[in-house]
Amino acid sequence: MSEPPADAETFLAVTDSLAALQPGLSTLEAGVLAALHLALAADSRSFSRVFGVEHALVLRAVEVLVGEAALLTVIERAPRTQRTHYAVTEAGRALLDHLHG
C-alpha cells in the first residue's frame, strides 16, 4: 500500500525548512523542491495546477533551481507548452538529506 499524499501542513513545513537551509531560495523555489521531494509534482505544469501558481512563475523558479542554485536538472521540456520535467541533482539530494538528519 502506498503512502497517502502529504498534507498542506507537511508541504509548508518542508518548504520552510528548505528555505531556511538554503538562504537565497524564494518560497516558490523551495516549494518546487518540496513538492518534488514529497512526490506532489515532478514537472512545472503539475506544480502550477496543484498549487494554483502561474506556469510562467513556476518556470522561472525552476530555472533558478537548475541554474544558479544547481539543485535541479531538467529531464525533458516540451517545446510547445514549455512543460518542464526535472529531477534533483546531487546538491539537491544533499540539501534534502538535511531535512531528515
Image: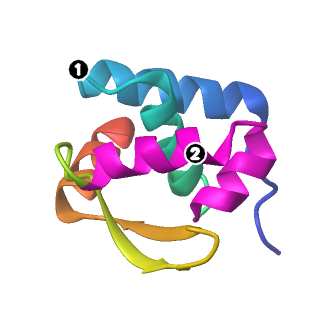
Q: Position of residue 75 (x, y in %)?
A: 40, 79
The magenta segment: 43-66
* Name of the residue lying farthest toward the front: 80
| 3D distance between C-alphas at marks 2 and 1 | 23 Å
**What residue did someone put label 1 on?**
23
Front residue of 78/19: it is 78
Q: Position of residue 35 (x, y in %)?
A: 59, 48
Left or right side of 95 for 84: right
Front residue of 33/67: it is 67
Residue at left 19%, top 63%? 90
**What residue did someone put label 2 on?**
56
Left or right side of 79 for 7: right
Q: Is residue 42 inside the magenta stretch?
A: no
Left or right side of 11 for 76: left
2 and 1 marks in contact (CB < 8 Å): no
47 relative to 21, above or below: below
Q: How crowded is mark 1: few (under 14 residues within 10 Å), some or many (20 or more)?
A: few
Q: Where is residue 91 in the image (x, y as percent from the top left)?
A: 18, 54
Amino acid carrying mark 1 in the image: Pro
Magenta part, dominant SS: helix
Q: Residues within 10 Å of mark 2 (few under 14, many from 20)?
A: some
Q: Where is residue 81 in the image (x, y as percent from the top left)?
A: 64, 70
Under circle 1, the secondary element is loop
Residue at left 82%, top 56%? 4
